[in-house]
Amino acid sequence: FRKTLLAKAVAGETNATFISTVGSELVQKFIGEGARIVRELFDLAREKAPSIIFIDEIDAIGAKRMDVGTSGEREVQRTFMQLISEMDGFDPLDDVKVLAATNRIDILDPALLRPGRFDRIIHIDYPSLEDRVEIFKVHTKRVNLHSSVDLHKLAEETEGTTGAEIRHIVIEAGLSAIRRGSKIVEKEDFENAIKTVLTSKAGKTNAYALFV
């Protein structure tokens, strides 16, 4: 969420066409499909230039691989090599810029981070307490909240969460209220939602934006 907003902001500031994809969408089951999608992505970006290509979760295709013995791993490798080829290719990128994002920079193939590829890295920290309060306000604007709900306390309890995760918490809390047969979301609904989201979050690391 934070990474995508940053990429969109860059595109907006430069009046560039914003073309977004997710690394997992480039992982295809059929031979050559992933590489074809990457080629078409860059062809579209050149056609719409000035443009920015944003690849979220690039670790899905750009992680270090010790074994490419399976057909699935070989297909991911083909897709990865096509991405490298497009970034290094004979056709200059000119007015096409490539941004990527990952929560797992530690597992990226070093080939991605070489000069001329993704050689500028920005660490994107989690929202501050004040930021989280504001994010809760945005996502609860149309929610019927019980008087027991204190957004500041919820923000304190959600240190280390992203804007997308806070949105997920609000949705989960609403579903909890529905399951109770209530149209009003109470403190207990949020407490259950926070537990659910933070449990699924376990093991995740900070986010990074990569710029070529």
Image: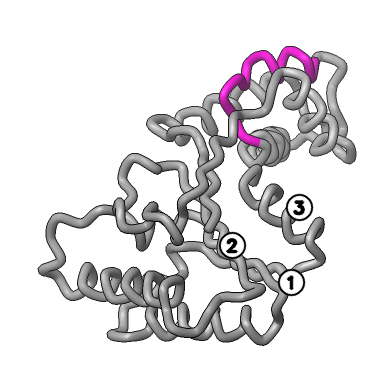
x then y, percent, for residue 71: 18, 75
Residue indicated by mark 3:
9
At label 1, which amino acid type do we have? Thr
x then y, percent, for residue 165: 61, 37
As drawn, 59 above or below 143: below
Dots 3, 2 in contact, CB < 8 A? no
> What kind of colouring is applied to the model shown?
one colour
Q: What separation in Å lies between label 3 and label 2 (alpha carbons)?
A: 12 Å
User: Which one is earlier in the sequence, the residue at label 1 or at label 3?
Assistant: 3
At label 3, which amino acid type do we have? Ala
User: Which one is earlier in the sequence, the residue at label 3 or at label 2?
Assistant: 3
Image point (33%, 50%), residue name? 108
Q: Which residues are magenta?
A: 149-162
As drawn, 40 above or below 88: below
Residue indicated by mark 2:
54
Rendered image quadrant of residue 42: bottom right
Residue indicated by mark 1:
17
x then y, percent, for residue 102: 47, 47
Q: What separation in Å lies between label 1 and label 2 (alpha carbons)?
A: 11 Å
Image point (87%, 33%), residue name? 144
Q: Label 2's element? A: strand
- Residue 176 in view of the camera: no
Q: Label 3's element? A: helix
